Amino acid sequence: MKFYKSIDELPIYYWNQIKETGDLSNLIVNYNGEQVTKYQQHQLKQIYEDLNKQFFDKFGKQDSYQEQIQELSQLYIWKIEGVLDNNPAAKIYARAEEKKMQSRETLNFDTTMAIIQRKLGFYVTAKQMTTTDYFTHIYLISKEGSNG
């Protein structure tokens, strides 16, 4: 049994399937539904952890991710202060931050793929595009949008 072990080779389709369903069998190359042993399940978990590390190493240090992490950190600090210190201002700040985060427009996977295809000028399936390529395109498109 062969596994996808790098986000440079893993098609974005399977990365998305894992994120939506949690089914790590999507990491098996040409998976056809055969039984996965406990040992293989263990291997899949390890591979998935490695893929997440690869993802963070490549994309987690970008400004947008750093901003999200900082916003989440501040939100949790306000929530904790609100509960532990019974601080009404912290509770208000936490609610406002949650509303701000929820109000951000999020695009679904299919819409994002369509935007990438339009930018590329040709059709590419999610099974053809690697996870690395997908997130690199998203990053470049977002930088384009923020620059003008």
Image (cartoon, grey):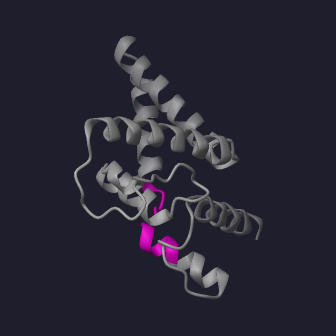
Say if 134 sits above or below 128 in the image: above
Name the residue nearer the viewer: 140 or 16: 16
Asked if residue 108 lies in the magenta stretch, the reply is yes
Q: Is residue 125 left or right of residue 55?
A: left
Say if 24 sits above or below 11 in the image: above
Name the residue nearer the viewer: 136 or 27: 27
Say if 4 sits above or below 11 in the image: above
Q: Is residue 9 left or right of residue 136?
A: left
Give percent across and percent down for residue 52. Answer: 52, 42
The furthest residue to the front: 1
Query: Quarter of the image holding residue 43?
Result: top left
Give percent across and percent down for residue 79. Answer: 40, 25
Q: In percent of the image, x 39 and y 42: which residue is there?
A: 44
Asked if residue 144 lies in the magenta stretch, the reply is no
Q: In percent of the image, x 52 and y 59: which residue is there?
A: 10
Q: In percent of the image, x 66 and y 81: which residue is there?
A: 120
Name the residue nearer the viewer: 45 or 79: 45
Q: In percent of the image, x 37 and y 53: which residue is there?
A: 18
The furthest residue to the top: 85
Give percent across and percent down for residue 112. Answer: 51, 71
Query: Quarter of the image holding residue 66?
Result: top right
Name the residue nearer the viewer: 48 or 79: 48
Give the magenta part as a residue range. 103-113
